[in-house]
Amino acid sequence: MTFLMITGRTVNQGVTVEDKTSAAYATETSTCFMHEFDMLELGLADHDTVRVTGACGEVVMRASASVEVEMGTVFVPYGPYANHIVAAGTHSTGMPDFKSHEVEIEPTDEEPKRVHELMEDLGGLAYDR
Amino acid sequence: MKVTLAMKPAAKSFIPIEAESIVPKNFLAGTDLSVWRGNRELRLDEVFSVSVEGDAGRAEDVEVVLSGETFRLKRVGEYMDGGTITILGDIGMHCGNFMSGGTIEIHGNADGWLGREMAGGAIVCRGDAADYCASGYRGGRKGMIGGTVEVFGRAGDFLAESIAGGTVTVHGDAGDMAGAEMHGGTLVVHGDCRRPGANMKGGSCYVYGTAQGMLPTFRKIGTVQHEGHTLIRFTGDIANRGKGNLFVKDYEYLD
Amino acid sequence: MIVKDAVCPFCGCLCDDIEVEVEDDRVVAVTNACELGTTKFMGEKRLKGPILRDGDEWKDITCDEAIRYAADMLLSAERPLLYGWSGTHGEAQCVGVHMAELVRGVIDNTSSVCHGPSILAIQEVGHPGCTLGVVKNRADLVIYWGSNPIDAHPRHLSRYTRYAEGFFLENAFRDRKVIVVDVRKTETANIADEFVRIKPGGDYAVLSALRAIVQGKTETIPRTVAGVTREQLIRVANLCKSAKFGAVYFGLGLTMTRGKYKNIRNAIELVSELSRHTKFTISAMRGHYNVYGSNEVNTWMTGYPFGIDFSRGIAFYNPGETTAVDVLARKECDAALIVGSDPAAHFPRRCLEHLADIPVVQLDPYPNATTAFCNVQIPVAVTGIDAEGTAYRMDGVPIRTRKVLSTDYLSDREVLSRMYALMQEAQER
Amino acid sequence: MTELLVKNACVIDPLRGINAETMDIAIRDGKIVEEVSDAAEVIDARGMLTLPGGVDSHTHICGTKVNFGRYMSPEDMRAGRTPRRGPLHSTSGYSVPTTYGNSYRYSVMGYTTLLEGAMAPLEARHTHEEFIYTPLQDTMANTLFDGNWGIMEAIRDGDTKRVAAIIAWTLRAVKGFGVKLTNPGGTEAWQWGKNVSCIRDPVPYFEVTPAEIIRSIVEANELLGLPHSVHLHCNNLGTPGNYTCTLGSLGLIPDLNKKRQTLYATHVQFHAYGGSGWKDFCSKSEPIARFVDMRPQIVMDMGQVMFGRTTTMTADGPMEFNLYRLHHEKWSNHDVELETGSGIIPVIYRRKNLVNSIMWAIGLELALLTKSPWQCLLTTDNPNGAPFVKYPEIIALLMSKKYRDAEFATIHPDTAARVPLPAIERELDWYEIAVMTRAGQAKALGIQDLGKGHLGPGADADVAIYPLRIDEVDPATDYQKVIDAFSRTEYTIKRGRVVARRGECLIDGSNATFWVRPKVSENYDMGKDPDFIEKFDRYYTVRMRNYPVQEEYLNRNRCIETEARI
């Protein structure tokens, strides 16, 4: 199913943002907040994993029901998961489309990666001492 | 005189090269020019294989031909006032900035800010033009004030932003905010575009296709015949002063 | 020991009434701060010392080695990018500008991915604004547009708007109306007197419609605009016109959606229009700590608030071309110095792929997502915790942050000054 | 010890009554001294015109409002761009240049001391930060008290000593130099979108009038013994017919100080307008100048307008909004809680525009009609009337009737019927220009005793040597030479070092900041006043402890202590 992905701040994202290697940060930023009817349609229960595919890649997140989002849109806290699929084009304004990104969402059996794994996928080297 | 500049392959191929020296009149005095790759000044012949045929006494008689991987070349033809530049491939940002005369022809695509703040002359782009084609500069009140820009492919967002004079024609579709802040001149989009004429207060904007996300602040006046198209005529943006004219074949509100 | 009136180093509110209790050089309790600020003060997961990536391993190196590495990297680059700056103090940002000027690089700060579009809009139409206290003491109408302070600026509501007392308001909670405009029914929307829910991408159209209605040109407006009924638009316009003092606070909901700065421009033009009827102001909800300070410093030193390219010696400014996401995604830089931000967590993947290809040095107290892309990381003191310096609040009020505890970490300014000194020496040679 | 000897200088030093004497100037360790040793470095001035370093007593160069002018004007930054060279930093901008741009350009014109005309106390730290990056001039900041709640309440209660006490506490806290009133009362009214019409119009809620604010603060200023007088931007700036309001304001001022004026009225050009509207707009420079001639307690500055592009910026928010409605250009406004506000819009003054042409004439008339040059100082209210780089042209206009006539021929033809300028024959001389650009300014600011504005032993060794011999150049006819000479010094010497030479700055210096600390009795220490503290805590959004500007922000700290009579 096609959705409009909006990203933004949440308190939990802010609380964990200076501790990016923590499980809490990964959990918060890999949460895909969805309307419960959309979840029903996709056969998803709370905390089921979903594959979210954008214009330039895919990433696995966990779905979570939210009363804040409209049907057809999903909300993902700012962070490395959303950015794994956000396109870098800025319409020559410097600012990517962080709040208006079309994505495909489907259920999956895969687990979300750790932040370190995402970084290593892109050529980084995790520091975990 | 014909000056041929063929780009040499380079190791740091993605660092932009600023080449505002590539303007026809500069070649009247020879080819001892420099360009900048990032913060390094390079001689023209370090970047290009340069060849010159014939000679000329005035810029109008100079033709510059660029070939190779020219997509990272910025500011080619800046302040050009006569002569011809032909680009066989793609060209980087700010081609023809402040141009006041002469012709630039691009066979490939043009990157952003093609013909920014242009005052005269002609630019023809056979491929697509990226964002801010024929636009103004940050904070400025006036974009293009004269001349013509013709794009045979598509144009990106903010096409002809703040245009105050001259004519811009796009044969394909244009992006979002075409003709935003328009206050003079003419913009013609043969295909579709999004939110044309936002905040316009002068000039004329024609869309032969569909205006998507049509803004709610244009008042419909009737229909007109224009170049063989039946178009719906609107006043300029009434959120601003309602001046200027917007003509579209068809439109859709975001309702 | 209790440090009073400490300044919170988290968001652009820079709350300066925080009490921090320190025992044995550790923060043990924080009073008055929100959850975000408290966690930041209490955070302990710092990087111990400078590290260097050596193949697939991390090695500890000395501070001198790390600084030397950074200086050499910047000096040898053809187009270095110096990015970040919102997490540090003004004095360090000044050194950063001098460095960019010397090595002829591109210097950009995190506003390019937060309120850069707001700046572009202000550069087109100006900015009728005010300090936060003016709103607190006077505003009887507050509009949050595309901003969600409960999550992003938790004390904004209690210190300045919904729950704040005000000199000219008898009963501030009752007399002050709050309107929230958003595509989501956020927590903030729940405490509003009026919630305007718009379709994603519809902000510009709604703002245009409001401008027309405020001018009395109602008849042209369609029955609904981006999901908002004409009746509601008229009601909102009337609320605005009948307010004695109205204040709009907008957030990334306007800057990050299609149209970007044109949305903000339209909002400012609405406020300018309302100023002909009553008193109205508009302000950006600046997010990260001292990001506004980085704009101020860059402006007085280079003339531009962000996205400055010194490649040619003089300052050139063109967001969309000289801003970090564009420079990285287009692979237009060959080295990067990151200070006080975490682009690997906040930039699209394509930018990270280029960071992986070029040398990167980062100054940051914590191991973060960008660490993975660093050749060298130098841990520094946290401005506002173990370093002091100047920070600018979201409304432009400059505040000197306090140092609440002492550590052995150098401040950003100290590290950068040493780097700059090496670079000056090299240049003189 | 460093020594410098400037030989064969043709010195005009009005504060010491020296008029074109050829002499040597001895400098040791940054100060003027009687003599130096033979080891001193020597500069041969070869009879060139040598003046004390220039002092600008009213300019906008540093702080929140100025920086916002830069921030919103990338188009302005496209001019004046220079790269980093040696110790010098890059610069950008024309009407609102970067701090380095301001500093280097002022230095090239021989200016060594600048007064920032308007600093909002809450944002003072910003002004001081920018001072640090204005390296080639000593700086000081006028501090805004026009809409200060505590002061208006004290005035309402008739308590002038409390007014003085609040000023004392604030100046000390924010490291301010003088007291500035911008559209007194109007900036507070503007926080409701209103204004005050003139000096008898009460401020909403506070119920005090601008006249009461002006009079009471003038008294408080003298109670505190401040070096500078109250610095007033009158109500009603820029409106036709405002000269009556200006005369009314000036008429409020008693003569309270023997050493200097009691009121400094700034950019009076903008306040000398006749007419009932734009249609019959005309000059009222004559009544203003006549009035000032009779009142030694008043000094004014010109606020000259010059044609071209610039940026207007002032704490006068409502005035800027009116300008915005006139021009529909971009408009910024910034109200500051409990204190004041500011507004900014870019403008272009055009020769073809009648109003602009009249404005241009009025500034010159004020300078030419006021008898004493000590009472009308040369400014453009930079950048409001024009960027300061236009000063040399203004000097030339004041010195040459021929130049004025030539310029007059290019402006709007109806101007002649609206202004007295064409009939004014006076041409100022070198001495008068020296008064209007340094000596008079230093005296008006009360800094001559601190070694500014003159070249007597003990003074700061700030010297400007201009490439011009006054015995060879007739300013009445050779006005281009006058412009050229004042545009770039042969040498600018700051604190004993040559900082600029023939249009090029040479070193990245370090400024000194002058500020005032009035000593008040315990009873009048607002830092201990329960009512003051309580209101501060309730209505400001910054804690009282975090409000004062720390001395870390002062490069070279020049604190002036005064003995207050409270």
Image (cartoon, grey):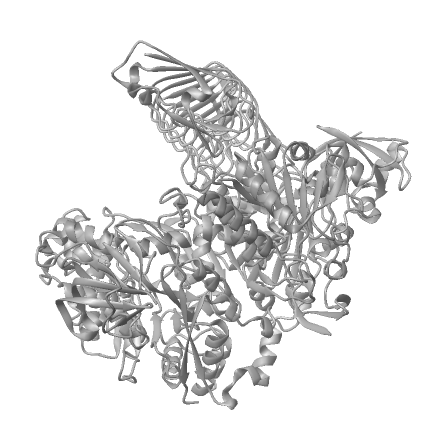
Q: Residue at (71%, 39%) from the top-left corner?
A: C53
Residue D171: x %, y % from top left: 46, 75
Rendered-image quadrant of the C terminus of chain D: bottom left
Residue D424: x %, y % from top left: 11, 61
Residue B135: x %, y % from top left: 45, 32
Say which of D246 and B39 sits in front: B39
Say which of C1 and B114 sits in front: C1
In the figure, is residue B224 to the left or right of C56? left
The vertical placement of B144 against C106, above or below, is above
In the figure, is residue C373 to the left or right of D187? right
Q: Residue at (39%, 42%) from the top-left corner?
A: D78
Say which of D431 and D420 sits in front: D431
Q: Residue at (39%, 45%) from the top-left corner?
A: D85
Q: Is residue C122 visible?
A: no
Rendered-image quadrant of the N terminus of chain D: bottom left
Say which of D63 and C101 sits in front: C101
Q: Residue at (68%, 32%) from the top-left corner?
A: C353
Q: Residue furthest front?
A: D38
In the figure, is residue C33 to the left or right of B15? right
Mark count: 0
Q: Residue furthest top?
A: B54
The vertical placement of C340 against B105, above or below, is below
Residue C183: x %, y % from top left: 70, 44
In the figure, is residue D467 to the left or right of D446? left
Q: Is residue B98 visible?
A: yes
The vertical placement of D462 against B158, above or below, is below
